[in-house]
Amino acid sequence: ETTQQKDGSLLTWQRSHGELEEELDRTVAKVSQLQTAVHQDREARAKEAEAFHKTVLEHTRQHDAVRKDRDGLSSEIHELKGMLMGHEGVVAKLQDSRKHEEHARQRLLQELERTQEEANSLRDEILTLQSQAMNYQTSVRHEGETRRQLENRALL
């Protein structure tokens, strides 16, 4: 019995050892799979981190470009405001000049109107004087003819 027991124990131990070896093989395979998964996960995270870093760099570059554009536009706006103020000054001077020209034009129009009225009065006076001169000449001729006739009659 002892040999048989020993043989049975040996068989039991061999079976147990075989089962433990199979379990150990399965555990090693699982550990290997987990290590592969962890390695793949680390590579994926490294790629994500690299992509994120590139994205951050690109956003920083874009932000710098936007800031540079903004500063350029701000400078341009400042320059344009200065030009606008200058143009407004010129416009104000032109408007003042236009007002003065309009006043001068009004004065000239009034002077022209007054001169035309004077010219019309002088023309009327000239016409009156011409009419009087013609009447006088007619009267003088008539008087001269009348005198001649009277002298001719007196001679006769």
Image (cartoon, grey):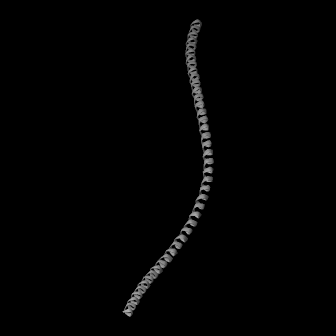
Name above or below for residue 41 compared with residue 142.
above
Left or right, 124 with reference to 84: left
Query: Residue 30, image x and y in percent?
Result: 56, 21
Q: Quadrant of the C terminus?
A: bottom left
What is the tally of numbered marks visible in this picture? 0
Is residue 58 or residue 80 the one in the foreground? 80
Q: Which residue shows up at 57% across the image and 14% down it?
A: 21
Is residue 52 or residue 141 the one in the foreground? 141
Query: Residue 147, image x and y in percent?
Result: 41, 90
Is residue 93 or residue 86 the one in the foreground? 93
Q: Quadrant of the N terminus?
A: top right
Figure quadrant of residue 16: top right
Figure quadrant of residue 153: bottom left
Query: Residue 101, image x and y in percent?
Result: 56, 65
Q: Which residue shows up at 51% across the image and 77% down it?
A: 118
Q: Which residue shows up at 39% across the image and 89% down it?
A: 146
Query: Residue 150, image x and y in percent?
Result: 39, 92
